[in-house]
Image: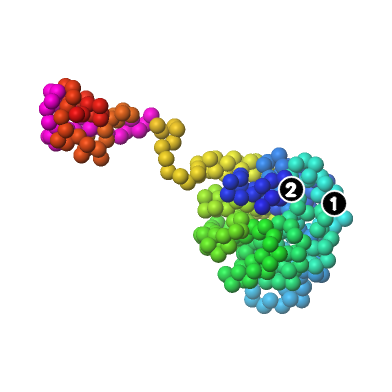
Amino acid sequence: MKIFDRKIGDNYPTYFIAEIGSNFDGNLNRAKDLIGLAAESGADAVKFQHYTANTLVSDFGFSNMNSVITHQSKWGKKVSEIYNDASLNKDWTEELFNFAHNIGIGFFTSPYSMDLVDYVDKFVDAFKIGSGDITFHQILQKISKKNKPIILATGASEESDVINAMNILSLSKNDICIMQCNTNYTAEESNYSYQNLNVLKKYKELFPKAILGLSCHLKTWTSVIASVSLGARVIEKHFTDDRYRKGPDHNFATNPKEWKLMVEEVRSLESMLGSGEKTIEKNEKSTVIVQQRSIRCNKNIAAGDQIKKCDLDFLRPCPENSLKPYDINKVLGKKLKISMKKGDHFTLKNLQ
């Protein structure tokens, strides 16, 4: 997979998406500032959301949910008002797209209507499909025909929902990243146990050609570290310059200082994970000598003597040319070419 100028996959660095969402607070210059901060902090791309309240939410539906409690209920306004306030002016799209590219990072969005899919197409490097639209097969079909990389979040969905969505998206042979996600955005510590990161293993089994990812809505990045160790190559987190600003997405977002630390820790983890091939590493070759055992004389032995088990000890160190304990059958019953002192290690050259 390639988004803008970054390649994504098992042999490439983890790809970081700064989800700005509504955190630009309705201000174009602030949106640009956040893009700049994200780039400086190590993000590979920024993501926005394109929607209009009337094509996304029903005030009637939300006001008649009876006892169902959602995080939207804490907003204190009609849901449509919140979405109208938080929406991105689509006329800014091209300017933001160019701004992001000019400072060297990718730009994409989650479009939440058919018309907006068409509108943003020429201004995005990829399409992100939010968890809530995983069952909106009509928009999945439309996005799949745009022949661009697709990132699919899978929060609040059953395995069957995910399989159905992936079947649709795969028809057009697009590069796809499938993200584990938990859509409870309260960022409470009680949510940690619901991240279910092992789903990434299942996704690897079900969709071997897809890139794995994580869309994280926690304040910490422990889940990010864990998901990368499980094979995630794309990470998305909300981004802000100030978690204490008013707005629906600031509270659980990551600030620039935290973002830099997160990226640094993942880069360290990547170097720790290595190739997966078990071998003696360069920095431990000297420790082989001092930590492993070699076959040694436990007494003086004269040249021509036949070696018996009682003549031997298995002791550290283990010089490069020495015989190791598993070589004992190469030693027992053999005669010495030269005399050896107590403590000397055996080599094949010592034996007749």
Which residue position is annotated with label 2? Answer: 4
Choose between 304 and 265: the one closer to the eye.
304
Residue 335: horizontal and vertical position, in percent?
15, 29
Label 2: which secondary element: loop
Report crowding for label 1: few under 14, some 14 to 19, many 20 or more residues within 10 A (C-alpha): some
Residue 284: horizontal and vertical position, in percent?
41, 33
Please tell me in which quadrant of the rendered image residue 295 appears. top left
Colour convention: rainbow
Residue 38: horizontal and vertical position, in percent?
71, 44
Which stretch appears magenta?
A: 286-313
Camera-near label (1 vs 2) is 2
Quick one: quadrant of the C terminus? top left
- Marks 1 and 2 sit apart, C-alpha to C-alpha, by 15 Å
The reply to whether dot 1 and dot 2 touch (C-beta < 8 Å) is no
The residue located at (75%, 60%) in the rendering is 147
Which residue position is annotated with label 1? Answer: 94
The residue located at (58%, 49%) in the rendering is 10
